[in-house]
Amino acid sequence: KLFGLSDDLAYIDSFEKHFLPSSKFRKIWDILVLIGLVLYVFYLPISFMHLIENSPFTKTPVLLSLQYVLDAFFIADAVFNFHYFVYFEEGLLVRDKSYIHQKFISSRNCWREIIGMLPLDLLSCFFGGRYLHHFRLVKVVRIPNIVNSFQNIDSMLSELNIDIDLSLYRVIKLNIVMITACHWVGCIWFMMASLSMASGYDGNWRVADENNEFLSVKHSDFAGFAGYLRSVYWALVGMSTVGYGDIIPTNIIETTYATFVILLGGLFLPAIVGGLAAYMGNFNIAGKTFQKKLARVRSYLLRINIGDDVLEKVLRYYNFHWSRQGGIIENEAMDKLPTTLRFSVASHINGSMIESTPFFSRCDQSTKQIIVTALQSRVFTPLDIIAKEGDNGFEMFFLQRGRVTISTSQMSLPVITSSSKGDFFGECYLLDSETSCETVTACVYCEFYVLSQDDFKEIVESADERLSVQNSVQHYVNQKKSRYQKMARNLTLRPKCERLLKQKMGEKPRLSSMNLILPDSKLLLLWDTVLLSSCSFIAWAIPFRLAFQSEMEMSHFDFVIDLVIDSFFLFDMVLHFRFIAFIQNGKLVTDINKIKRHYKAHKLRLDLIAAVPLDTIARLVLPSRFANFVDSLKLLKLIRLGRQFHTVDRLFRELLDRGFNLAPLRLVEFLSGVVLIAHWAGCGFYAVARWKNRYQECAGKESSGLEISKWASHHAECLWSDTWIERQIRKGKLPTSGGATLQLYIRSFNWALPTLVVVVIGDVVPVSSNETLYAFIWMAIGVTVNAAIIGNVANIVSNLETDSADFAGRVDEIKSFMFKHRLSSSLHSRVDDFSRYLWSMHQGSTVEDDFIMSLPYTLQTAVLEHTRAKHIRCCPFFDFCSKEVVKALSLCLKPRVYCKGDIICHYGDMGQEMFFLDHGTVEVISADLSTRFATLHDGSFFGETALFIKQPRASTVCALSFCDILELTKHDFLVELRRRQINLSCMMELFNSIHNSNIRRNKAVNENLEISKNQQTKLSKLVQKADDSMCYNNDDEKAKVFKPYSTFRLCWGICCCALSIYTCVAVPYWVAFAESNSDEYSLIMINVLIDMFFMIDLYLRCYEFTFPANTQYEKSQMAVDFISCFALLDVMSYRLSGMKHFRYLCLLRISRIPSFCDEVSQNLNFRGIRISLAINLLCKQGLFYLMTNHWVACVWFIIHRYLERSEKFTWATTDCPFGGDVGDYKCLAKYDPVIGEHNICNLGSMVECYVRSFHFALTTLSTVGYGDISPVTEIETIWENCVVLTGACFMAGLIGAFGAYLSENDSLGMNAFRLKIQSLKNYMSYRNIPDYIQNEIFFSHHFRWQKSQGLDEHETLQILPEPLQHDISYEVKRRVLHLVPIFKPLPLIVQKRICHALIPQVYPKDSIIYSVGDIGHEILFIVSGVVTVTLPSDLSELDTSGKSNAALNKEKFEAIGKILSAGNHLGESCLNSNSGVRQETVISKTTVELYALSKDDLNGICRFMGSDKEKEFKESFLRRNGNIWHFFDDLPGMVGPDKSDNEEQDLLHFPWSDSAQSFNGSRRPTNAVRRRRLSQARRRSLSYSSRDVFRNMFLERRLQRDDQSSRSVVWDPGSPRGN
């Protein structure tokens, strides 16, 4: 009665169907509600404007009438929501009226709805019409509903599948919020004037605004709309921190409100700009991510020198993948879905396809569903051979989309073309030994779903069902073969069939691609660059002409340029219509008809509009009074500008291929766009002033010349009266004649650019209503532009969008981890060296070519032919393998990167891999590292014994340099050979030959070394000479003083950094503010000493300093250092005056300051002074910001001192900080009309002038603005605009640097830890987790934070080579090895592997570590603290293994005690249990620190041992705990990793340390031996704790009680103790 199913709507009548949530009426109603609320938002503030005034209904009838209509609409909305609008709840349709009422009451505030519906306006009939707007204010209570309305619209858009970029949608909403806020603030500001008059004040801002002699504003303009416009204009100016100063408060009421608005703007604007910046930075994030991935792929393919044809195929595949799936990998997306949902989606896509397959019809429905889910997507490129006749395959193919041809060897032509969804082939591959009877070739890009043979066998578990399916498949294959034989016979016996087939399969002749221009050709790029230059020219020229040229005034040069550009556009149309191929869905289209149709459908209309000279035609046809309209037709040519953005991308891609850094170019590209928009805005601002007064009416007054009427010439007064240009002339910014075109353009641009970047100005302001409206529009746009600058420039400057930022962040995490654990300098150096190599050679990725696995199989093999397949092909073991086997094995190779000094293979390890040396050098050495058997270089291989024989490695392989190695595991090798059914006899024969040869070579080397020990032999002398040569050439023997982390290098780096900064600061200051030549000699001497220092630095860096990548310095930095040293020629300036300009070369050292800072930072990090990457970036940003301020100040004064020496008015002559008039002695400079020049500085010293210059630079660069110091001349204005743009970029960069710093704190610092704890609290509160468990969790996280600041060791060290990871883990956890006696006798490499596998844990006091019956597969080692062990009294909680071992477990704890401390371990029973059920309960008595070693990790470590040593090592966990041996009998069988049945037995034994003891189950010490050990323990018991004495007494009593027992317990006090 209450609910109905959401899918069953048959019983709802036609009237109620309109009220369903998914009905069209409800959707339209939601849109109308949103529109109504938006109108309320804009209408209600207008009521504030008339609150104080006597404004009855008759004054604003239209506005109030619309509001009354809205009131009626919302009353109807309340009725519908309260009584009629049904809703869904948990998938059920709720139709009961009482529930609808409750839903309305709970979701909406009833009192707010009732108040909003009350017609309080009627009360104005009793109180008077002036109070009408007061009663309208109660409608404000409805405005909060706009949030829910926007949510409804968002849901509706998602239901209608309307794809809107989320970032763009949010940008639009934030702009609406900003305009709404300005609207409300402006309306209240308008009311403040009325409130001022009502309060008795003589003046208000409206009166002052209209009476301003410099303004021509009338609030009655635009039918009274101008007053509102000025109010909103003031609101935007004040809230955006622009602060023109043209509208100011005039009394205390207005001042109070203005102060509040400014405070609100200081909070509101950063929120809006920050949100816009974030959204602008994330705009089209999917496309940016795809382009970044594509750039990485392209860079890698070019680096390996792959062929152009393969490169184009790969890029076209990605183009096809993006156009089809938007870059989404289908298999990964499906894996993230829940199981049931994945079944549903897969059934929807492929269910019908499996149902229609004839040989799957006998399977039950559940099997079909699993088959559908097991299908994997595959893509094949055109002309790929999907299946080849006679080959053995492993996958059956189902065609999803595309077209293929099927042929056989019996027929000369492909007889079948398949393009229907659900067509399948390769079904014979489901059989074990059946080969393909057909060749299938892809004609276009084809999408398939494949079912592998292994998946098929796993799914169809029943033998009868599988046999039935295989019989059906065999029958279908036999039918297909028979059909192909008949078709071949028909083609042979009936020639007419062959002719008909040729006609059907034949295609229309195509134009050869040699006659077409390919889309990626260099010729097309050159032509597109010409078009880009043309479009850029018209983008600048057309707005300039429209604004600054007179009507119908056009020079012959302009006409010729326009004619040439129009010719370019027309010629481009012809090329694209006939001669330029294109790529569609990844396929190159060369058919002429398709090219024509594509161009007609997509580009012809817009190109025709832009190319046809409509303005010229209109000028010839239309009369002169339509001149403005004719000129505006030129704007249509700007349509072509949007077509040329792809050309910029192609140019950047070409530069990236040549190794250029695109970040500066991207910054220039973006800033060029900002300047272009400012150019348009400035031209429009001038046009508004120019079109206010008719140009023809003032043309007759040009003859009056320069005669001044009031404030300018007659012509200028006529043309520019009541415009912003009039104010510029009055202020002396422009001459009385109005100025030349360039002067006017500079002044208009000086308004546009600061407005767009939201910088405070004040010398150019709007003075009329038209200009106010125009300025308001551009200021609103300026907020978005400023946000775009912050969003894009911050990302570029702080390097947040590049792979280098991600890699640098990961390296910084590693350094933070090493700094926290205070690791040795050698490890720091190795990490630094490896990170440099990894970035320079592999762009920071250890699996740089992982994208290959996502390519189609043919492209995979094509790429691997240039990288991996050559190693398989050149290896003699695989000479007998076919091409398919070589391709398959090359796919199995895994890339590895090793650091210099890493041991790749350890002597005695049970090898599981073979290695191919792609790049680098390794040496093969003996077990004791004293004998070098061989040195291997690029293309070599080693470790091949592991693939063929199960025996320990016979030698150690160490990396002599950074090595790129490909690894082939034994498991992958055997799987491929087993699948391909290859005979290994030839391979084994060749292996034995090479293996025996290596044994003989190593034996001969050892014999020669033995002979060389005799000093009398010739061989001894040769070896000694070689050793001396190696010692002489060893780079590691350099002086320690030149090592990277030496104290000398730290001091030298600080000096380099300081002297570079001094040079870059002193030289500009000396040029700008040098007072005399008296100190020139001393300055030159200082510069000479600095230059000599840097010459020594150049020598040291080239020849003495130890550089991990010396070639990198030679390529990128040495040239700068070398050229800057030529500044030393400045000493010759006394003899040759022109030589002093060489001093400016030293300014090139500014580019070296970041590298010097990084060098100092790395040295400080090494010494324990942690400087993170974000802090380093922030410091460099701050340093360069201060230096830029200094440079701007110097250039600002250089302009005054050198470039404007003869100008009467400059910024310095008009800047009077101590009062006085312009030209007075109190100004910075004074003009002398006698000599026609001004002096340099009027103040007491040049330092004071420098302070004023620095004040201008700081206020402008910081976007605070200026007013006391402003440009006067054109060159000063141009420089000021450059400074404004630079300042906007610097502020965005500082925002990005601070953002990176805060982000680092949020991801790594204390803030990240607090956020993690808070999220854990929320989750545990939601799950109602008990308090004691919460406390344990929080305690564990606090412990991890104290240990390593929350960094996960394995995740942090993931990019490092495995040997380096082992070394770092060994340094961090070495104390665990000292505490646990079992680990001490192990070889060093085994200890390192164990340390890498240990996971730290901590438990507070009285915590349950684990209980009986818990599942656990880890062994826990106690490092600190004490625990108690409780054995179960009820064995029902144990599994079978636990019950059988219960007695042994009890005896064990009777022996070692139930109180365990450091050095003991727990949970070792998991080694002989599959289930992992715990056999005891362990509780902490103090705070306990544990390290866990999982069973899987232990098995992984043991796989490098022989089976005997593995057994002994695992038994040691069961026989010994801490220092006590507690079991000597045969142990029950332990559960280890699965062993392959076909692997051979061990041939050699693992070389254990001599101190290790071997325990065999058959050996048991006698009672005499046990008593001797006990007596030794008694004699030494005084040196140990009381607990040890108690254990000795316990052992003695046990021996007396059971002297004949076969078991005994011995504690060896000679072993080191745990704590």
Image (cartoon, rainbow, N blue to C red):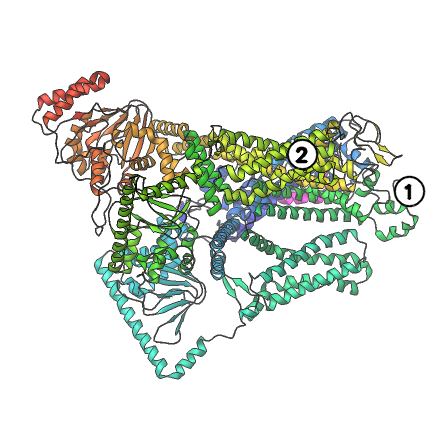
Q: Position of residue 1208 (x, y in %)?
A: 84, 36
View extreme (front): residue: 1016
Q: Position of residue 97 (x, y in %)?
A: 46, 43
Where on the picture, by quarter, is residue 1377?
Answer: top left
Q: Quadrant of the C terminus?
A: top left
The residue at the point 9 percent across, 27 percent down is: 1605
Circle 1 residues within 10 Å: few <14, some 14–19, many ≥20: some
View extreme (top): residue: 1582
- Label disc, if present, on residue 708 of the rendered structure: 1
- Depicted 116 relative to depicted 3: above or below: above
Q: Nearer the viewer, residue 1149 or 625?
A: 1149
Q: Is residue 163 left or right of residue 1500?
A: right
Q: To which residue does mark 2 refer?
A: 1189
The residue at the point 22 percent across, 19 percent down is: 1587
Circle 2 residues within 10 Å: few <14, some 14–19, many ≥20: many
Badge 2 or badge 1: first in the primary sequence: 1
Proximity of marks 2 and 1: CB atoms separated by less than 8 Å: no
Residue mark closest to the camera, 2 vs 1:
2
The amino acid pointed to by label 1 is Ile
What range is drawn magenta here?
56-71
- Label disc, if present, on residue 551 of the rendered structure: none
Q: Position of residue 1159 (x, y in %)?
A: 52, 34
Magenta stretch, overall SS: helix
Q: CA distance from mark 2 to mark 1?
A: 41 Å
Q: Position of residue 738 (x, y in %)?
A: 84, 45
